Image (cartoon, helix red, strand yellow):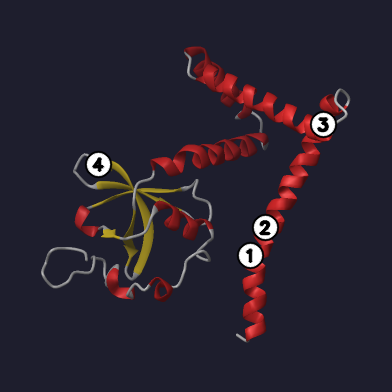
Amino acid sequence: MSTWKRDAASGLVVLVPIIVTIWVVWWLFRFIANLPLIENQIANPALRVVLTLVLFALLVLAVGYLMRTALGSIVEAAIDDVMNQVPGLRVVYNASKMGVETALNGTNELQEPVKVFTWDGIRMTAFKTGREAPDGRKLLFLPTAPNITSGFVIEVEQEDLIETDETVEEALTRILSAGFGERDRAEKGIPIDVIGDEGTNRPATDGSGDGPR
């Protein structure tokens, strides 16, 4: 790639996310400021936005407190039941609910990422759950890309896990970006064979028989 193309690509990588973020924030600001019930009562747009956000925060806290009670569980179950009776709407409702639950709670429950061989020569990223199957195998969550709200729960022997030096954030970035968020291993200064022997279903060893390096 020529120098000007590299410069253009680097510039776009930095500027496009900033521009999109600013646009989304501005769109939300205008949307909130122009809500009919608020717009007719308060003339100052900034004050309308602040008041709306404060009211929304109070609503979130009130509903959250309610959900921690026995009545809240009954109300939530009733809402889920009603929404799931409406064709089309239930898809949107369940998808948005699952997305919020994953964004707020799901990643906090994921433990360190590992690699597993699902088929010969194919290595995939999974996450430890901290739980075990009745026979002692480790329970892992194997998310799909780029939608991490779906995936598979798999049971793997401890010796079949390939430990990595990745953080949860790094692994999730790669999955959510469908692989485009992964840096070249050469940039990290990590040998390619440090994670495992390609084309096998066992972790790499240093020849001492002590397991993965």
Q: Check whether the beta carbons of the residues at disc 2 and disc 1 lie within 8 A of each other.
A: yes
Which percent across, then down, holds residue 203?
Answer: 24, 65
Assign a secondary structure to mark 2.
Answer: helix
Kindly identify the residue that appears in the image at 50 percent across and 46 percent down: 149
Q: Residues within 10 Å of mark 1 (few under 14, many from 20)?
A: few
Q: Find disc 4 in the rendering and name its residue.
A: 133
Nearest the viewer among 83 and 70 is 70
Kindly identify the residue that appears in the image at 86 percent across and 28 percent down: 39
Q: Nearer the viewer, mark 3 or mark 2?
A: 2
Residue type indicated by callout 2:
Ile
Residue 73, relative to residue 134: is it above or below?
A: above
Instruction: Give the label on residue 35, or none.
Output: 3
Residue 13: quadrant of the picture: bottom right
Separation (CA) of disc 2 from disc 4: 45 Å
Instruction: Give the label on residue 14, or none.
Output: 1
**Quarter the C terminus occupies:** bottom left
Separation (CA) of disc 2 from disc 1: 7 Å
Q: Check whether the beta carbons of the residues at disc 3 and disc 4 lie within 8 A of each other.
A: no
Q: Is residue 69 visible?
A: yes
Q: Nearer the viewer, mark 1 or mark 3?
A: 1
